Image (cartoon, rainbow, N blue to C red):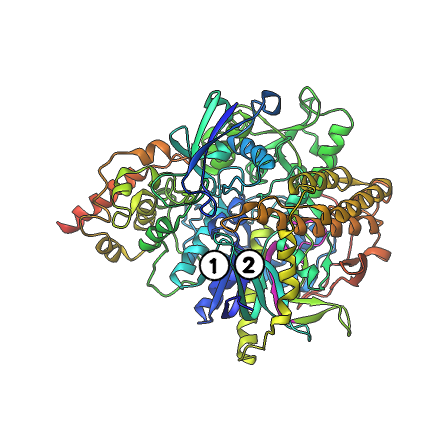
């Protein structure tokens, strides 16, 4: 076979914050690292994160990692794994200081320390007064972090394969992951990257929903690659709807807007969150605020001619503060809603935002799956970090400011774990040409000539189906119909044809490959949602309105081969402190 | 609305050409951005090539030349473009296909200014302190999204793409020179010495005129020159 091969110690797929943080850790340890990304690294979706990154620095108010841990466990509606959450919250301050040392231009307090703002679901003293834990670079924190990490990787001489698309993981008969087949988008040429270790850091799958806050590239590529490699996806029914996307369009307006003093009002001008969360009000957890908005609209108190949204109000704040702390969302609202937040409220509605579920990993970033001996056996050579992974620190509902933290803490942890593995496994295993066959077939399938369905048409049906059948509130009836529809769409994939078979920068081919990924991830999401008969975090069943810890305090695992869901226990035991047992959750 | 779009696929086309497309008014609305229209066109003709990602002006993927001006398709309202629009790739870089240019030269310039914080002190256990006033100096600099709109609209870059660093890279150079935490001022300035890398800027100011993020590379270049002069005295 005439496909060129390159060998690296580590292959990292995805150049967002998680991939770049891991790459930096590895490059600084003199590992030979290849980062493959379908876009130039600074175009990755980390760039769009706005509000900030959580760490108990206590620069503004007293704080402790233990309070942060409590908030994260409670926010997860007790589905988060408490060992991983303890690890993350303890590691947070150091991880943020490291970012600062890398050059991230954090906003500053008068005493020169990092600025921290209030965010949803944060408290002092285990559920007491509002904390201020979110470290911010104005409202462009993701941009600042992503660019700084890329810059430090330039300094560390990390090897980048920009605009290469990963087709599939390559594994031998024993199940060891040995790299990936990738496609040079600019030339259409295939390349085998052999690696002793492979890290998936491909981000989320927000594009399974029609209206979403995500970039068009967020198509769940790594999750689908894992599924095709026989690895299940965990907790996919938990998809976060961000309370404040611009209504009908989806552009994200950071929780930082409410953290800086903004609030939501309905058509009566009522600050309705006071009814739903008397204590935290507009800074309740995202699942709580999103359900409140949808309820207001359903009960006829929506704003606008169609009564289909609520308003995010900041005009009572000093406009200098808005310009200083929220300049980018002010721009976004000006551009996409045509109003100036300094004097006019913005129309908002809950919008698909974040994939809590993903590839199951432990707190070292190692991918774990049930193989023969228990639910959490390691897949040799395979790691995952960031939104594509499910550690699980977010459980059934992620707190704002914990996603940037997740990528830097677990990107770093995965890097360190890989360094250990590389020390113990010094040589590449043999990768036979036979191992390439499934990945090559995946590509060859799109060379079929002739007429058929279009990629664009099927994708539109997919995203509409997910929006209609897997939204903020769910019922058995709506989900059953959704599963039927999704399986129908999945069957139609064989009839989809490309018209453009050219080699040079064929974006249509990339979109076809992305559609395959979207389809697998969407089916996983819909089926997992259908199976879970309780309401927990972001998964709200009208027909099962209560959380059911007796039957459902467990993680879902969706398997592609059998198209079925099974379960594994939640890790409720932290590393050193006492567990936080499930309690009724109110804000 | 009519669209005249630059097409070139090196596998099949001997030379580039302009192709006309049309979208009927009932498929458009006043809220749409140019990217929305391009996505509609691509749904009909999947061979049309352009980069895109975030759709909200933060990732910098969809820089293109729109009615003679560089800009980002995702934050360019259709309403302001009139009844017909001509779209070309960003000028001054080799075309890979259609509206997709080879940005390697642009990235090379960026890497050439050592775009990373250099601090030689032992790492503190906590953050480096930086006053709000010191931090304010980075505003208008760190927000660059590397879309390439400025550099590819700069005649000095067109003339000396391999020698002049261009506005985007120089903006980043100043971003680190202006950072109170950075300790490589001498090396950075020495690296910019000579007649081309910095001094080919003739303050034509196309960069300022078109930057989709409202940044001012010309001012940053002026600041670097001023710092050089101060240091040489």
Instruction: Decide: is B59 above or below B71.
Output: below
What residue appears at the point 24 percent right and 55 percent down from the top-left corner? B191
Q: Is residue A361 left or right of residue A192?
A: right
Q: Nearer the viewer, residue A59 or A101?
A: A101
Give the distance between the C-alpha atoms of the residues marked 1 and 2, in whole angstroms: 30 Å
What residue appears at the point 52 percent right and 54 percent down from the top-left corner? A188
Residue assigned mark 1: A161
Numbered circle sitting on residue A92: 2
What residue appears at the point 40 percent right and 54 percent down from the top-left corner? A103
| Residue B142 pos. (x, y %) | 40, 45
Residue A131 on the magenta segment: no
Tag 1–tag 2 contact (CB < 8 Å): no
* Element type at mark 2: helix
Label 1 resides on the chain identified as A
Q: Is residue A22 left or right of residue A113?
A: right
Instruction: Decide: is A336 above or below B180.
Output: above
| Residue B4 pos. (x, y %) | 46, 29
Range shown magenta: A380-398
Q: Is residue A479 left or right of residue A263?
A: right
The residue at the far left in this view is B233
Instruction: Decide: is A326 above or below A90.
Output: above
């Amino acid at each position: 076979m005439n496909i060129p091969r390159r060998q690296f110690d580590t292959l990292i797929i995805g150049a967002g914050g998680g991939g770049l943080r891991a790459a930096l850790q590895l490059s600084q340890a003199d590992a030979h690292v290849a980062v493959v990304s379908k876009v130039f690294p600074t175009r990755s979706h980390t760039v769009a994160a706005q509000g900030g990154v959580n760490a108990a620095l206590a620069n503004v108010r007293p704080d402790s990692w233990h309070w942060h841990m409590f908030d994260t466990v409670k926010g997860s509606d007790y589905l988060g794994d408490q060992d991983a959450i303890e690890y993350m919250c303890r590691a947070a301050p150091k991880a943020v200081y490291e970012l600062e040392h890398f050059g991230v231009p954090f906003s500053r307090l008068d005493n020169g320390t990092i600025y921290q703002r209030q965010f949803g679901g944060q408290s002092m003293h285990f559920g007491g007064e509002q904390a201020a834990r979110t470290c911010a670079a104005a409202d462009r924190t993701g941009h600042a972090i992503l660019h700084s990490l890329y810059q430090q990787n330039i300094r560390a001489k990390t090897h980048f394969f920009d605009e290469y698309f990963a087709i599939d993981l390559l594994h031998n008969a024993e199940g060891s992951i040995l790299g990936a087949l990738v496609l040079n988008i600019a030339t259409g040429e295939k390349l085998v990257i052999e690696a002793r270790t492979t890290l998936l850091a491909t981000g989320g799958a927000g594009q399974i929903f029609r209206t979403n806050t995500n970039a068009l590239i967020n198509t769940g590529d790594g999750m689908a690659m894992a599924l095709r490699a026989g690895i299940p996806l965990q907790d996919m029914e938990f998809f976060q709807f961000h309370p404040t996307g611009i209504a009908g369009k989806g552009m994200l307006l950071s929780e930082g807007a409410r953290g800086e003093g903004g609030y939501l009002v309905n058509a009566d001008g009522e600050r309705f969150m006071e009814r739903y969360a008397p204590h935290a009000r507009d800074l309740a957890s995202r699942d709580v605020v999103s359900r409140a908005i949808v309820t207001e609209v359903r009960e006829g108190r929506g704003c606008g001619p169609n009564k289909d949204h609520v308003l995010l109000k900041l005009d009572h704040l000093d406009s200098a503060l808005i310009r200083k702390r929220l300049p980018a969302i002010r721009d976004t609202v000006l551009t996409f809603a045509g109003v100036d937040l300094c004097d006019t409220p913005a129309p908002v509605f809950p919008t698909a935002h974040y994939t809590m579920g993903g590839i199951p990993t432990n707190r070292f970033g190692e991918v774990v799956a049930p193989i023969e001996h228990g639910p959490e056996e390691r897949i040799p050579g395979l790691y995952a970090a960031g939104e594509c992974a499910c550690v699980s620190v977010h459980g059934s509902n992620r707190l704002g400011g914990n996603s940037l933290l997740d990528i830097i803490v677990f990107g770093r942890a995965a890097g360190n774990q890989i360094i250990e593995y590389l020390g113990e496994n010094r040589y590449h295993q043999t990768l036979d040409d036979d191992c390439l066959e499934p990945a090559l077939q995946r590509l060859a399938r799109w060379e079929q000539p002739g007429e058929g369905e279009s990629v664009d048409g099927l994708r539109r049906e997919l995203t509409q189906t997910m929006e209609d059948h897997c939204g903020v509130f769910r019922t058995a009836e709506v989900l059953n119909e959704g599963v039927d529809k999704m399986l129908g769409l999945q069957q139609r994939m064989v009839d989809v044809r490309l018209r453009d078979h050219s080699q040079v920068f064929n974006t249509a081919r990339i979109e076809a490959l992305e559609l395959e990924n979207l389809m697998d991830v969407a089916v996983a999401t819909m089926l997992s949602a259908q199976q879970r008969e309780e309401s927990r975090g972001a998964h709200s069943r009208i027909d099962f309105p209560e959380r059911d810890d007796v039957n459902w305090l467990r993680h879902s695992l969706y398997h592609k081969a059998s198209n079925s869901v099974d379960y594994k226990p939640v890790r409720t035991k932290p590393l050193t402190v006492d567990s936080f047992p499930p309690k009724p959750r109110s804000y | 609305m009519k669209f005249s779009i630059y097409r070139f696929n090196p596998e099949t086309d001997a030379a580039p050409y302009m192709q006309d497309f049309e979208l009927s008014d009932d498929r458009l609305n006043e809220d749409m951005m140019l990217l929305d229209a391009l996505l509609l066109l691509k749904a009909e003709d999947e061979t049309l090539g352009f980069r895109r990602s975030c759709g909200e002006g933060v990732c910098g993927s969809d820089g293109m030349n729109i009615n003679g001006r560089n800009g980002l398709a995702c934050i360019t309202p259709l309403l302001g473009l009139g009844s017909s629009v001509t779209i070309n790739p960003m000028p001054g870089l080799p075309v890979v296909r259609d509206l997709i240019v080879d940005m390697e030269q642009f990235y090379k310039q960026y890497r050439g200014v050592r775009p990373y914080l250099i601090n030689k002190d032992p790492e503190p256990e906590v953050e480096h302190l930086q006053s709000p006033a010191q931090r304010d100096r980075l505003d208008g600099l760190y927000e660059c999204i590397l879309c390439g709109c400025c550099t590819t609209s700069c005649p000095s870059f067109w003339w000396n793409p391999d020698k002049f660093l261009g506005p985007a890279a120089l903006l980043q150079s100043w971003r680190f020179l202006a950072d109170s935490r950075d300790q490589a001022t001498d090396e950075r300035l020495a690296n910019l010495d000579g007649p081309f890398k910095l001094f080919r800027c003739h303050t034509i100011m196309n960069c300022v005129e078109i930057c989709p993020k409202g940044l001012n590379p010309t001012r940053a270049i002026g600041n670097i020159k001023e710092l050089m002069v101060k240091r040489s005295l």
